[in-house]
Image (cartoon, grey):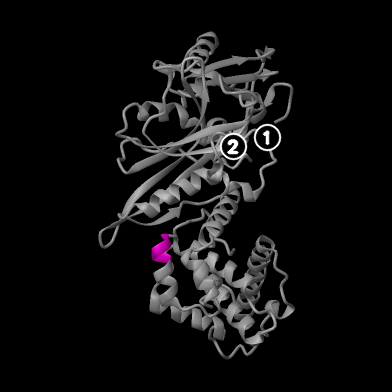
Amino acid sequence: MTSRWTSNANEATCLRLAGAPAPNDAVFHPEFTYPIFGDAETIYGYSDLHIRLSFASGRLTPALDVSYKAKNTTTAAKIDDVRATMLEYLPEDELVTQDELNELAAADARGGSESFRPHGERVATYHRKTKPKGCTSLGSLFSARARSSSEAQQREFDIFHATWDTPGFREWHARAQIFTLFFIEGASYIQSDENNWEFYTVFERVAGEKGDAYHFVGFTSLYRFWCWPGKTRLRLSQFLVLPPYQRQGHGAELYNTVFGCVLDDNDVCELTVEDPSEAFDGLRDTCDLARLTATGSRLSQAINDGHLRPPIDRAWSDMMRAEHKIAPRQWARMLEILALKHLDQTDAAELRAYRLQVKARLFRKNREVLLQLDKVQRLEKLHETFEAVVDEYAEMMGVDLADALLEAPVPNLDVNVPELPPMAKRAAAAVIEHGVDDEDEPRKVPRVQ
């Protein structure tokens, strides 16, 4: 339905962090509003509709203002009650007027003992130079901690760890959680009565007239599962950096801090990720590769010792994965990426061993889908997926692929032999021997990738 009375909900919704340092106090728009206004993300009944949802930039006290030029009073169709719909997702008892919000944000920006303070324990501090949005290079993501806080034009950021038991955090989270609906596809509110949740929040720290003032940047939520025989597994569920702070390296700092805490926690055996987006996969790959190959790391030494020459020894791989606390699928990807970088592309046997190793993992991951295809289709789909995967790896690492690596197998067209191709048979045997890979990153729709 398109008419003067129909509004795009994403465009009509205007978000703002009142009191944040410029330009981070500018209006921005949500990426998604379908959890609130339906799959079409449209609102009917108004012309020139504006939904202004502002937050005090630290404590996130909200103010909601709905305005429009005209309302359709002649239609028989149902007109959306915008304010009532929004209030279903906001803590109504904490709403203030826009004037009250401006006063509250200004008071917090001055700092001092009565201003907002982030909840929980501060676990990391880092700095960023003031620079135009979008100018951060990948290299700078991992060098920020080495910079001096006394360097000119530095901005300071703190990361805090909290749980539901942290005083005041539950109430703060109730105000913050609407951002997950706006910016994380498929997100829903988490259950606050489940005690296993924990959180890491990021705030910019600015010197105010009376002391430090804090402004919300982003956060991540994690769930702690028991893992036999006496450990726990952390699953990262939601991960968000608000648009005014994106493309400045804050996501990498937050992820690296979480992983550093995981490595320091003897009770945690691994960090997994729930249904990661493509953008998060890229961030995760970059951070994990940088950490694993840092000068002096055990994996860096293992590369020099030839441990990544295919086929990679499974016992060695399992030992190293447990030490680095990386989920099985992500660990396999990291080893495949690094093995490709160090592959002797003039050695036909090594190329074939690498190709079979990657295809065996892809077969295990997509076994149910692939076994629904006939023998020829299965080979073609598996090789097509292999090419897409190694193309991604090559682009990531700046590697040129040898034609021999991408050589497709010749299908066996003998329909009287109802068996798996040799490579797939070996992969199936590995599944029987070692068990199906624990899928720590479930997709909503099974797909080969």
Residue kind at label 2, given as amino acid type? Arg
Name the residue beneath numbered marker 2. 128
Q: Residue at x 44, y 51 (%)?
A: 259
Q: Position of residue 152 (x, y in %)?
A: 62, 32
Q: Is residue 141 above or below residue 303?
A: above
Quadrant for the N terminus, please. Answer: top right
Residue at the outermost left position: 230
Of residues 419 and 116, which is closer to you in this image?
A: 116
Q: Is residue 290 above or below residue 23?
A: below
- Residue 118, quarter of the rendered image: top left
Is residue 374 shown left or right of residue 236? right
Q: Residue at x 50, y 79 (%)?
A: 427
Within the magenta stretch, is there residue 89? no
Residue kind at label 1, given as amino acid type? Lys
Looking at the rendered structure, which numbered label has been put on residue 131?
1
Looking at the rendered structure, which numbered label has been put on residue 443?
none
Residue range in magenta is 321-325
Q: Residue at x 36, y 33 (%)?
A: 120
State how far apart marks 2 and 1 are (Cα).
9 Å
Q: Position of residue 189 (x, y in %)?
A: 43, 36
The answer to whether residue 46 shows anywhere in this view is: yes
- Residue 128, quarter of the rendered image: top right
Of residues 353 and 291, which is closer to you in this image?
A: 291
Q: Position of residue 30 (x, y in %)?
A: 61, 32
Q: Is residue 440 above or below residue 336?
A: above
